[in-house]
Amino acid sequence: MPEIQPADATRARFLQIEKFIEGIYPSQTARTLQTGQVAKPGRPGVSPEEEERKRKEEAEARTDVMWLAIAVFGTLIVITLLMVRTYLLPLPHHV
């Protein structure tokens, strides 16, 4: 197990402190400060439009992954069926 160097320990402690402060005082963007919205604790400030866009992107990503999985498994099934068919019904040999 590698020994933790002082710089690594300092960096780890700094990240813990930063995470703690971010939980108390979340980051806010210029847009949230202009509209007077308050950021939810532990999350950077985002406008409702940005949240909706992010939600749509995540839904689209899930759909893309689903279709990709269907394509992969469909291809595997077709190849498997062709291999089984060739094994059970070999092609005739012409002499």
Image (spheres, rainbow, N blue to C red):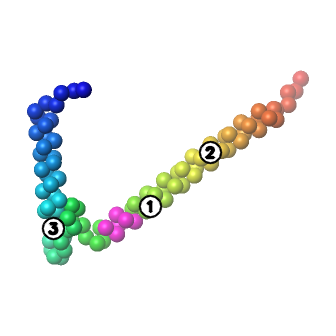
Distance in Å between CA atoms under marks 2 and 1: 23 Å
In the rendered structure, which segment of residues is drawn in magenta?
51-56
Q: Amino acid at mark 3?
A: Ala
Q: Amino acid at mark 1?
A: Glu
In the displayed structure image, the side of residue 63 where residue 82 appears, left or right = right
Q: Position of residue 15 (x, y in %)?
A: 16, 47
Q: Is residue 54 magenta?
A: yes
Q: Position of residue 64 (x, y in %)?
A: 48, 56
Q: Is residue 64 above or below residue 76?
A: below
Sequence order check, earlier mark of 2 and 1: 1
Q: Amino acid at mark 2?
A: Thr
In the displayed structure image, the side of residue 67 where residue 31 appears, left or right = left
Quarter of the image with the N terminus in it = top left
Mark 2 Cα shell of 10 Å, populated few (<14), some (14-19), many (≥20): few
User: Residue, x 85% and y 31% (percent of image)?
Assistant: 92
Prevalent SS, magenta region: helix
Secondary structure under tag 1 reads helix
Q: Is residue 2 above or below residue 80?
A: above
Secondary structure under tag 2 reads helix
Note whether residue 73 is visible: yes
Q: Residue 20: name its quadrant.
A: bottom left
Residue nearer the viewer, 36 or 3: 3
Which residue in the protein does label 1 denote?
A: 60
Which residue in the protein does label 2 denote?
A: 75
User: Residue, x 12% and y 50% (percent of image)?
Assistant: 17
Distance in Å between CA atoms under marks 3 and 1: 28 Å
